[in-house]
Image: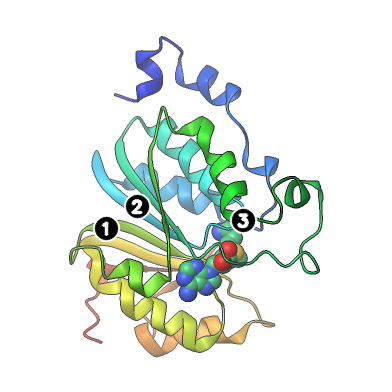
Amino acid sequence: MAKGKILNLNTEQLLASLPRPESVPGFSSFIPLYEEMVKGAPPECTIVEVGSWCGRSSIAMARAIIRSGKQIQFVCIDKWDFRDPKRVQGTIFEQHDFCLFDIWTEAISPFRPYVNVRALQCDSSAAAALFDSESVWFVYIDADHLFKSVFKDIKAWYPKVRFDGHIGGHDLADDIPGVEKAVRKFFGEKWKKWGQRSWLHTKAESVCKK
Ligand SMILES: C[S@@+](CC[C@H](N)C(=O)[O-])C[C@H]1O[C@@H](n2cnc3c(N)ncnc32)[C@H](O)[C@@H]1O
């Protein structure tokens, strides 16, 4: 049962009282993919987000988990090391002294009573090493979009995905060719485009031995 029901709020009332993704800066066009993954998830499982930045996509996932009523452990991974005032502007950054981790922490904190959310502030591959093989239902990679980085992330995370799970990521786009190149190099044709800018591989459909 979702913790929200314990408080005698119905789920929609609870969600109405919690922040929406747009309350923090972000890029996520993949919220429907998050919702679909949570809908298809087993009642108890782990979902990982690699690249959480200010928390927009993390909020979207937290909301989907609350709506599902499932016991999903949600792990957000980011280096949260980028705080260059020349490259990010806006009140929210100034208020937090350009500390991205503080922005993310504040964004997600209203969800903590209702969702089992954890943060790992480290490099994606180092974080992957902390997970057991085939222990994660869904991993979404939205970190560095260079070819080498995306390939490294996929290589690190693919073995951690459950036999019936999924791995996907952002940002398939003509002006960011490294993402598709890395996905093709790892999966060949065994992946699909999801929505406008995401890719998705379903492990059960094929087992890649790379
Ligand atoms: C595009 S932003 C994520 C946006 C977020 N998913 C959203 O939709 O709001 C990319 C994030 O990935 C993080 N990142 C980049 N390379 C990383 C790595 N190797 N390990 C962990 N985090 C990384 C950056 O710190 C940055 O916060």
Amino acid found under the numbered disc labelled 1: Val
Ligand 1 within 8 Å of disc 2? The answer is no
Please tell me the numbered disc located at residue 136: 1
SS for dot 3:
helix
As rendered, which of 93 and 125 lies closer to the eye?
A: 93
Q: Quadrant of ligand 1?
A: bottom right
SS for dot 1:
strand
Amino acid found under the numbered disc labelled 2: Ile
Mark 3, other Cα within 10 Å: few <14 / some 14–19 / many ≥20: many
Label 2 with label 1: CB-CB less than 8 Å? yes
On-image quarter of the N terminus: top left
Q: Position of residue 70 (x, y in %)?
A: 31, 34
Q: Is residue 196 visible?
A: no
| Residue for point 37% across, 16% down | 5
In space, the residues marked 3 and 1 are separated at their CA atoms by 26 Å
Q: Which residue is mark 2?
A: 47
Quadrant of the image occupied by residue 59: top right
| Residue for point 51% across, 20% down | 14
Residue 95 vertical position relative to residue 195 in the rendered view, above or below? above
Q: Which residue is mark 3?
A: 100
Ligand 1 within 8 Å of disc 3? The answer is yes
